[in-house]
Amino acid sequence: MKKSPFYFIVYFAVCFVGLAALYWAITLSKTSIWEESAFAAWYRMFLYHYTHPMQYIGVVAACYALVATIWTVFMKRMRTGLKRFLEILSVILVSLVLACPLGGMLWHFHDMQAGFFPSFWQQKLLNGFSEGLLLGPILILLSIPFNIISLIVGYFATDRVNAFLLGGKEAGFESISRFSCKMFASLAVAFGALWLCCAIITAVPEREAFRQHLSVSMLVLFLISVSLAVAFARCACARDKRNRNHE
């Protein structure tokens, strides 16, 4: 239980960095079936999730980190085969179920920020909870190809991160930690370069708001990636040092 905060931070960072990077890659490349965003939209729906995408991704990442942390803490042993597959799939699906109502409440909060702030605002947030449960799964299913890529990458990321946090006895701790270190270091370089490019290329008055939003997002992802790269590198070095002492 003492390691639970560390588990939560690692799961949250991995999920947030991955989803945010995928969101920007699909949105900027316009490879989604939706023209303006990687996210889907309902008929006559105010597009607050287009305006504040990182906040909605943060909700999903927080729910995923919570569920994955509970799963890791109470896992007695690492299973293999079909049981392992079903466990990881359940973690992802339960996370989405939790995120849908919270995302609906966040959407209604943004609606109140936009000017519709009734006296019964508590009821409005509760309406967002129920609407999120109803419409959230539909929007997720319609967010193609964001949902498909997220599910596939999320499965393997959850498998690897969980094996790393449990010590990697069955999956090979050293190879996982070194791979993770290189992966997040590469992400840090990529996000840093993309951040600088976006800040330069889009530095025109008509796109100032977009430039600022994208630059801040890339900077946050860059800092998170650097932090994770350093954390995994220190874990790998500590493991190697313990192995040399044992020898």
Image (tube, helix red, strand yellow):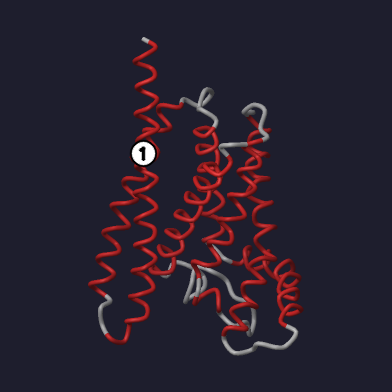
Residue at position x 57%, y 71% from top? 40
Residue at position x 55%, y 78% from top? 48
- Quadrant of the rendering where the N terminus is positioned: top right
Q: Nearer the viewer, residue 164 or 42?
A: 164
Q: Where in the figure is residue 42, as x and y percent of width and height?
A: 64, 77
Left or right: 146, with 236 as reference point: right
Answer above or below: position of 13 versus 140: above
Read off the residue under disc 1: 181
Q: Where in the figure is residue 109, as x and y percent of width and height?
A: 62, 77
Answer above or below: position of 238 versus 38: above
Answer above or below: position of 125 versus 190: below
Q: Where in the figure is residue 220, as x and y percent of width and height?
A: 38, 60
- Residue 59: which quarter of the image? bottom right
Residue at position x 36%, y 33% from top? 178
Q: Count the labels in the image.
A: 1
Q: Amino acid at mark 1?
A: Cys
Q: Secondary structure at mark 1?
A: helix
- Residue 43: which quarter of the image? bottom right
